[in-house]
Image (cartoon, grey):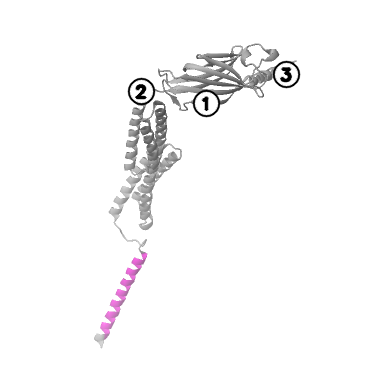
Amino acid sequence: MKADISRWIILLLALVCAVQAVSAFTMIKEEITPTSASLEPGQEVTARYLISYKMLTTGSKYMDDETFEFSTGLQKPAWDFKIRREGCPDITIPTRGGAYQTLLEFEIGYEGEVQLDVQLRGTVPRTPSGEMEVAKIEHFRDKTVEDVYRMTRKVVSAEQVGSSLSIQQQNLKNLKTDIDARAAEGVDISAAQAKYDDASKALTSAASASPSKAAEHIATAIKAMDEAKPLLDKAWAEKKVSDTGAVLESLDSKINYFIEERSMGADPRVVSLVTKRESATLYYSQAKDGLNAKNYQQARSKADEGLNKANEALHDADALRDTIGEGFSLGGNLLLYVGIGVVIVLAIVGVVIYRKKTRWDELG
């Protein structure tokens, strides 16, 4: 008995899924003129939608319980509907006016796959409203929405664009200040500068464009500036990490001098240098990890800590070398020292020979 109930439940679910699949409509084509992402108050708009659909109840099952409902935020709208069926002449529904339209089942209820060609004309309201719904299409069955489609656009006025342009021009100046500051520190600003140039060009174009086009240029500028900031952060962090690495290399050279050439590896002062060097190296490693993880603030912070510790050790190393002096070492100048030794030996030999010869002369 339980197995039979389970089979009935599965069958009912399958039927529900089948009904949903059949009832769905598909948007084949959507067009709007003007094509800009934003519209202006008072602007004339034309939109077209080509829909493929299949009614659930047609012919002998005709119940007039399915409708298509249309609405728009445009003023003085005009709707043209055309029904297309393969192998049959198009059926044209006379132009209708009004923000809300309904097509009943007896108007569009044909068997098989049918296409509905919808054309809408209207004017953007004079009062800006932020985002406007150009068109909304709903497929109802028994007062239940089976499918819905929306097309929206932002509405921008000259006043709104002017205010936005002013804000973004100031943001561009702030970005330029940051770029110049990093350039003064020796940071490679080329990638960020290229994005700055793109943003500057877009804002210049926005200043002389219509509101809808200006809004597009401003959006382009915002995107370029948003991309410039992480590029500048990355280059700045890379410079910090590189500077720390260079100081560590110099420190290593000095420590190696004390250990290898002056045999001072056990000297407490050299041990202290090695300890500070290890601390600086740890910060340097953490800075590189931050750089790889794109955590540029952490990379800069750890690089600064490593640089401070390395510079401290470097100062101590220079002071220690001044204290102990150059000393004597065979490392690095071996040939020079060998040459000096040979000269000294020859001089001694010469003196000895000279004295012997002088003694022989005296004897006679």
Q: Report the Cα–Cα distance between label 3 and label 2.
A: 65 Å
Q: Residue 312: x, y in percent?
A: 32, 45
Q: Which residues are magenta?
A: 334-360
User: Along the horizontal axis of the image, is 55 left or right of 303?
Assistant: right
Above or below 341: residue 256? above
Q: Quadrant of residue 239?
A: top left
Which residue does the numbered mark 3 point to in the structure image? 7
Q: Secondary structure at mark 1?
A: strand
Secondary structure beneath dot 3 equals helix
Judging depth in this view, the residue of 287 and 275 nearest the camera is 287
Q: Identify which residue, 259 or 147, lies in the foreground.
A: 147
Q: Which mark is residue 31?
A: 1
Residue 181 locus on image (x, y percent): 32, 39
Question: Magenta region's main secondary structure?
Answer: helix
Q: Say which quarter of the image contains residue 9.
A: top right
**Mark positioned earlier in the residue sequence (1 or 2):** 1
